[in-house]
Amino acid sequence: MMRTATADSPTRDRLLDAAERLMLAKGYAATTVEAICEAARLTKGSFFHYFESKDHLGRELLKRFCAQGEALHRGFYGQERDPLKRVYAYVDSAARMVEDPSTKGCLLGSFAQELCDVNPSIREACAEGFEGWASQFAEELARAKAQHPPKTAFEPRELANHLLAILEGSLILGKATRDMKAAAANLKHFKAYLKMLFGQ
């Protein structure tokens, strides 16, 4: 009998870890169950003990990635109390992250690009992931806006979506050009835009 999706198991984690590495490197469609099992050094029986299918694994992997991402992004704000400084710290942290050679890419963005037109369940999971990410940053922008009235009016959620578009687009561009410095530069331009909006 397959265990529940929330089961805490080192074996399940090994399968998810292997799938994430392969799917970030090769894509979802090109990653087979066999390849995942081989990379995890586990049998297909182990795979199907935890996952009904590759799609099931994909949804669970995306859920885990988004949960880890939420915790990571909260750390981007640092220890600043001023909400505007927290927003700036977030953008600086994101710029450092994309330049870090250990950063392998964004599974959320990769899945959205590859699967949203062909896999409705993954598309819904991607939409939820982006929603949570944008909402988190929008909340910080709203606090900054309340404490530091901007020079130019803006909607926090629209500006949060703009950041996501810049970051995801920059990751795609950086992957294609093998140059993540350009991705970091785009985020620095976004920070300059924020400073113009707030006049500081």
Image (cartoon, helix red, strand yellow):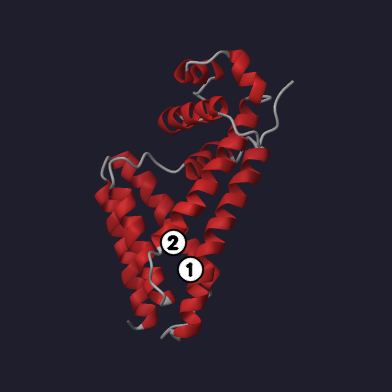
The quadrant the C terminus occupies is bottom left
Q: Specify whether 166 is left or right of 158.
A: left
Q: Which mark is residue 172?
A: none
SS of the residue at dot 2?
helix
Q: Which mark is residue 159?
A: 1
**Point 47% across, 26% down: residue:** 18
Residue 96: x and y in percent read 30, 54
For label 1, the crowd category at 10 Å Cα-Cα, with few meaning under 14, some 14 to 19 and many 20 or more, is: some
Q: CA distance from mark 2 to mark 1?
A: 6 Å
Q: Verify CB contact (< 8 Å) between mark 2 and mark 1.
A: yes
Residue 11: x and y in percent read 55, 24
Please tell me whether residue 102 is drawn above or below residue 130 in the rendered image: above
**Point 40% across, 64% down: residue:** 77
- Nearest the camera: 144 or 179? 144
SS of the residue at dot 1?
helix
Please tell me whether residue 117 is drawn above or below residue 41 in the rendered image: below
- Nearest the camera: 78 or 84? 78
Residue 121: x and y in percent read 67, 39
Q: Quadrant of residue 85?
A: bottom left
**Point 50% across, 23% down: residue:** 31
Look at label 2 and name its amino acid. Leu
Look at label 1 and name its amino acid. Leu
**Point 52% across, 75% down: residue:** 142
Q: Quadrant of residue 46?
A: top right
Q: Which residue is mark 2?
A: 163
Residue 151: x and y in percent read 41, 86
Q: Specify whether 123 is left or right of 29.
A: right
Q: Specify whether 39 is left or right of 89.
A: right
